[in-house]
Amino acid sequence: MGIGKPVKQALILIAGIILLAVGIALLVLPGPGLLLVLAGLLVLASEFPAVEKYVDPIRDRAMKAAEDSVSSPLRIAGSVLAGLGLLAAGIVWGLVPGLPLAGWSSGSSLILSGLILFALLIWSYKRVQARRSANAE
C-alpha cells in the first residue's frame, strides 16, 4: 500500500526545500553549495514540473564549478588543504570546550563538510580525466 499523492508531494517538498536551504547556506559556508542546490531542484522537479526550468542553468554552473576546482594542480592543492582544514577544525571544535559553539555537533558538521569536499574533489577529478581521455581519442 503506497502513500497518498498529497503526502508524497509534501515529503518531496520538505526534502527539496531542506536540500535547497542547506545548499544556499553552503554557498557562503565551506561545502558543496551549488551541488546541493542542484540536488534540491532535482528533487522538487520530480514532483513539481514548474521547477524544471531552473535545473539546467544550475546544473551547468555546478558542473563548471566542479571542473574548475580540479583545473590545475594549485587548485587541487588548495581544495585538499581546505578539506584538511575542515577536518582539523572539526576535531578541534569537538575537543576544545572553550570555543564558540564548541561540541561535537559543530565539529561533526565540519568533519562531514571536509569529507564531502574530498568526495566531490575525487568525483570532479575523475570526471575531468574521463573527459580529457575521451577528447584525446
Image: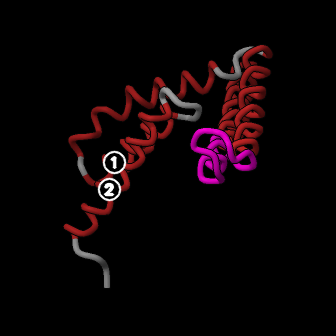
* Residue 137 visible in the picture: no
Q: For mark 2, does the 10 Å Cα neighbourhood hold few (<14), some (14 to 19), or many (20 or more) residues? A: some
Position of the C terminus, as image quadrant, is top right
Q: Within the magenta stretch, is there residue 48?
A: no
The answer to whether one can see residue 86 in this image is yes
For residue 82, side relative to residue 106 (left or right): right
Circle 1 packing at 10 Å, graded few (<14), some (14-19), many (20+), is some
Give how far across and how far down residue 61 sits, in percent: 47, 23
Distance of label 1 from label 2 (alpha carbons): 5 Å
Residue 94 point in image, percent of width and height: 70, 49
Q: Which residues are magenta?
A: 94-113
Q: Main secondary structure of the magenta part?
A: helix
Q: Quadrant of residue 40?
A: top left
Query: What amino acid is labelled 1 in the image?
Result: Ile
Residue positioned 38% across, 49% down in the render: 18
Q: Is residue 39 above or below residue 55?
A: below
* Horizontal side, residue 72 vs residue 1: left or right: right
Q: Please state the horizontal and vertical placement of residue 107, each as a whole percent of the image.
A: 66, 47
Q: Nearer the viewer, residue 64 or 26?
A: 26
Give me the residue at 19% from left, 67% from top: 6
Evaluate if marks 1 and 2 touch, with contact meaning CB atoms under 8 Å apart: yes
Question: Relative to 91, does residue 68 appear above or below in the rendering?
Answer: above
Reading the image, the residue beneath label 1 is 17
Check the image and report above or below for 67 versus 18: above
Q: Which residue is mark 2?
A: 14
The residue drawn where x is 80% and y is 16% is 73
Give the quarter of the image for residue 133: top right
